[in-house]
Amino acid sequence: MAKFQTPEIKEYPVIPRIREGAMAGLKPLTAKPDHQRALGFPGELMDNWKEVAIDKMADLLGKYRSLPVFLDACVKCGACTDKCHYFIGTADPKNMPVARQDLLRKVYRRHFTFAGKYFPKLVGAVDLTKEVLDDWYSYYHQCAECRRCSVYCPYGIDTAEITMAGREILDSVGIGARYSNEIIGKVYIIGNNLGLPAPALRNTLEGLEEDVKEDTGVDVRYPVDEKGAEVLVIAPSADFFAEPHVDGLIGYGKVFHEAGISWTLSSYASEAANFGIFIGSYENMKRVAMRIREAALDLGVKRIVVGECGHAWRVAYSFWNTLIGPFDFLDPRYPAPQHICELTYDLIQRGALTLDKSANDHRVVTFHDSCNVARATRMGNKPGGQLTIPRDVIKAVCNNFYDMDAGTIGEATVCCGGGGGLLTDDLMELRVKGALPRMQALRHVVEEHGVTHMAAICAICKTQFAKVLPYYNFSMDQIISVHHLVGDAVVLGAKQ
Amino acid sequence: MDFLSVAYALLFYFAAFVLVVGVGRKIVQYARTPAPLKIPTTPAPTTGTGVVLRLGREVVFFSSLFKSNKWTWLFGWMFHLCLLLEALRHLRYFTQPVWGWVVLVQPFGKYAAFGIVIGLLGLWGRRFFVDRVRYISAPSDHLMLILLLSIATSGILMTFVDHTDIVSLKAFALGLLYADWQPIPHDPLLLIHLALVAALMIVFPFSKLLHGPALFFSPTRNQIDDAREKRHVTPWASDTGTGAAG
């Protein structure tokens, strides 16, 4: 693997001067033909890829209003140019949101606009060549679809939409990223991203029950496929696998235990994440999501609760009702899928949990807003609940909490650097460099307030930080699940 | 009627036609293209009134741009505000008698031209001096600024230096409106000013000037955040099956 240098954290955040071609060589491994075909895509680059790509672009332009509007509206004002964490970390100008969009826009102009057809040089329109296609593959896999640019664009242009279209066009001509496409295939065959089969899942959960019993002396249950349970929990499969994720899952179980709510996981729908969104494929997104509806109906649950997973919550909150709704079979009091933080927050408000905040006194905590939770979803009834509810949960279980710099949290949060289907070792350089703004903000609260842990509610964020924190001289266990904090503070048996 | 008067009359009918039909076609395209998924950039309003207010803040104050970059906001907002004042002031050439509030706008509108120039120069400067903005600027981005600057400068020269025969010009403008053509003053500054305005009208539907109408169709800004409360369905998406693989 190529060597690269971890960016230096300066005293203050710095917007780099552009360095053309800085990340030009970087691209993820491509999916094998079998993986492509399993998702309904051609196995490898087609001979007539050019026509197919332009046809696909025409198709998408007619299907998604965002595309023609975003491709036409940009005035190149530059407002977004310093907003992408990948640009800040790499200085490659093609990682500026507008320049990333322009890779697609210049072909759109050439083929679909009057100005681009007749005056291509004037408006920067170009034909679709192999070079352009390679640029698409490279730079549409250097975007985490985090939507930070869309906050600052005067027209709300969301580069995530352009990236998704770019990836969908690439898939339609036979070039897909191995990481995302292989994982979607695993969901179809096994039920989750990790490829963890049902017996292994049952085994893991039994082990978890034993661990918790050993730690606490209490029989906290981690049930799977229990018909008639009230709540179906859809967790990211990372929660079954390793720290820091699994401590979050332990926390969910303790919350349900104390609240006296029966719950279950599903071995058929054992994955919250929906990588269909990453590749912009409506069909695949719907197919992945449909497993959850089927599992909910099969198990006869009354509520669906989604675990700590960022893009998953976006798909669940914003898209499930469209993709797999209506949810008329659920309890009318909880007619829509909820986030585990909403559930815990409600229980805390109702006094249904006894909490010992001092259990977290050895930690000083900050909170990383996961990009897609912050900018593409909501929790609770009020706009911005996705920002306040997780913090209120943390503050209810933890005495020491400090927020990071205002420009890096809330709607302005910076992506962890591994979102949107980039959480793969072949993009390690990008992931480390893209984490720079977050690492900078973390360093600041560590020095200012002695923060020891950064809490998050996203499996990708947690995996990414566990990997990149050491590059910046933090320790990998400084990333922690919000429900790990909750689980440590819940006093078991207090209500019985 | 001389040749120039006829030519300018025809030019403006053509420009108006291109502007109205061109922008109309784009609006129809935007309106007819479905937005299959809920993608408002959140935190987003949960009611229709909230969305109207959100778009209102974007249109009137450029609120997202303000969050992003104060210099770009300052120059951009100054340019647009002054352009609006200037456009309103110009209504006096198309109304007889001149509407009362247009009379009130006149003194502000007259000097707004300088705001336009300052705003444009500020925006143009960014295209040279900020390396990121220089990188993303195409020739058309520079030309658009030159076009607007030329319109503003020729206007300023007529207002403050070399007056044109404004009474005849108004007769020409009203003549266009009421299909009763009148001669146009043969004043080079005026002819340049008008030709450039016509050019602006003609390029509008084919250029980034579409950002105006497009903003109202931007799903990240105009959607209500009610995905859980209301099922959002559009035709092609609800017909999409899940057995696509094979």
Image: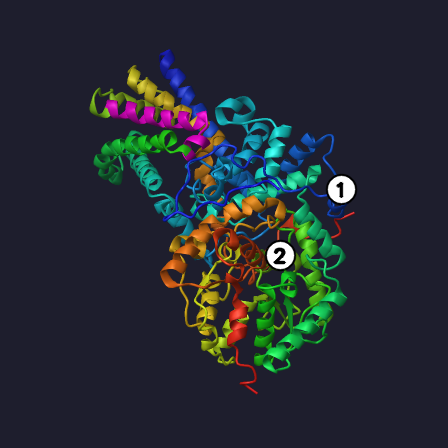
Q: Which residue is labeled 2 in the image?
A: A322
Q: Main secondary structure of the magenta part?
A: helix
Picture quadrant of residue A343: bottom right
Of all chains, the one bearing label 1 is A
Regarding mark 2 in the picture, which secondary structure is present there?
A: helix
Outermost residue on the right side: it is B246
Give residue B158's position: percent from left, percent from top: 25, 22
A92 left or right, relative to A51: left
Picture quadrant of residue B81: top left
Q: Which residue is labeled 1 in the image?
A: A33
* In magenta stretch: residue B146: yes
A294 left or right, relative to A100: right
Tag 1: amino acid: Pro
Above-or-below relation of A235 to B9: below
Q: Residue at x 38, y 49 (%)?
A: B57
Outermost residue on the bottom side: it is A496
Tag 2: amino acid: Thr
Q: Residue at x 50, y 50 (%)?
A: A435
In depth, the one of B128 and A325 nearer the eye is: B128
